[in-house]
Image (cartoon, rainbow, N blue to C red):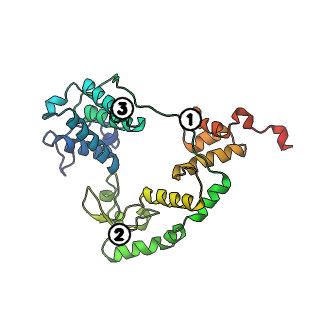
Amino acid sequence: MSRGRKGQPRQAGIAGPAAVTLALIIPNPKLKLLDQVREVMRLRHYSIRTEQCYCDWVRRFIKFHQMRSRDELLGGGGKVESFLSDLAVNGHVSASTQNQAFNALLFLYREILRQPFENVQAVRADRPVRVPIVLTIEEARQVITAMAGVPQIVVKLQLTHQEDLREGGGGVYLPWAIERKYAGAATEWKWQYVFPARGLSKDPRSGRMQRHHVDEATIQKAIRAAVQRLGLTKRASSHTFRHSFATHALQRGADIRTIQELLGHNDVSTTMIYTHVLRTGGSGMKSPLDCL
């Protein structure tokens, strides 16, 4: 990969502001395979977790086939098929895990090796049909009431940032070269996370100690603890509140298209699952005469 004046990778194809996301990014041939994957993913603005996940799948793929050179990766369609099939047959992974592995290898062959594959006929992992878990309105209220700490976090937000600044920190990771464009933006209050993590952590890319957002696992654990304290038998999680919101809105007579838009579903058939939760189908709609 050729380099610009400031060491930034050059890209072939579309020029201008959209070049990073739309252009063909040529991996640096001097880098090792996984370093090329990381470089291109960062130029494409993938999250750090996705980057780590994809690199892990590439490692597992290489280890599975006992590959020792880049040349052994070529002609990847059949190799990908056998790897994905093994995940389903012997690994007993879920459909979502198998899809995650597929996407990682698709990225590897399309973006790094420049050998995109098509029509991979792997054995597919079973995808069980699940009806969303929904809390009743009263259950949702009880779970929220049983949780603690959110008001305290809100009160302490500005105090935490001020303490970080006094100690020489207070910075946050900024994507898309914003920090280079706006000097000092990383330490400004308006760029901080609304719900920051309790402690500082090292940014895996820059190596700087920064305060990231609160880990989603923290919220999941708090919800799980509240559900257990209340003695509820439903497998409730943070996503359950999304399901509950949609179901309660339908119960109140909301239009299915409105729910679709609020939830961001591309296809209304995805939203229709909530009518199965209610077991009402189209009969759940209120008649105009009911409002008279």
Spatial distance from mark 2 to mark 1, Cα to Cα?
42 Å
Residue type indicated by callout 2: Gly
Residue 187 picture quarter: bottom left
Q: Nearer the viewer, mark 3 or mark 1?
A: 3
Q: Can the viewer see residue 89?
A: yes
Report if the CB atoms under discs 2 and 1 are less than 8 Å apart: no
Residue type indicated by callout 3: Ala
Residue type indicated by callout 1: Thr
| Label 2 or label 1, whichever comes before in sequence order | 2
Closest to the observer: 24 or 76? 76
| Label 3 or label 1, whichever comes before in sequence order | 3
Q: Which residue is mark 3?
A: 88
Question: SS for tag 2?
Answer: loop
Question: SS for tag 3?
Answer: helix
Q: Can the viewer see residue 13?
A: no
Q: Residues within 10 Å of mark 1 (few under 14, many from 20)?
A: few
| Label 2 or label 3, whichever comes before in sequence order | 3
Q: Is residue 242 left or right of residue 37?
A: right
Q: Which mark is residue 270?
A: 1
Closest to the observer: 180 or 172? 172
Q: In the image, is residue 210 above or below residue 85? A: below
Q: Which residue is mark 2?
A: 170
Report the residue at 23% width, 30% height from top: 114
Q: Tally the marks.
A: 3
Image x and y of residue 209, in percent: 29, 65
Image x and y of residue 32, in percent: 15, 42
Spatial distance from mark 2 to mark 3, Cα to Cα?
45 Å
Q: Residues within 10 Å of mark 3 (few under 14, many from 20)?
A: some
Report the residue at 26% width, 24% height from top: 78
Q: Nearer the viewer, mark 2 or mark 3?
A: 3
Report the residue at 59% width, 58% height from top: 231
Residue 158 picture quarter: bottom left
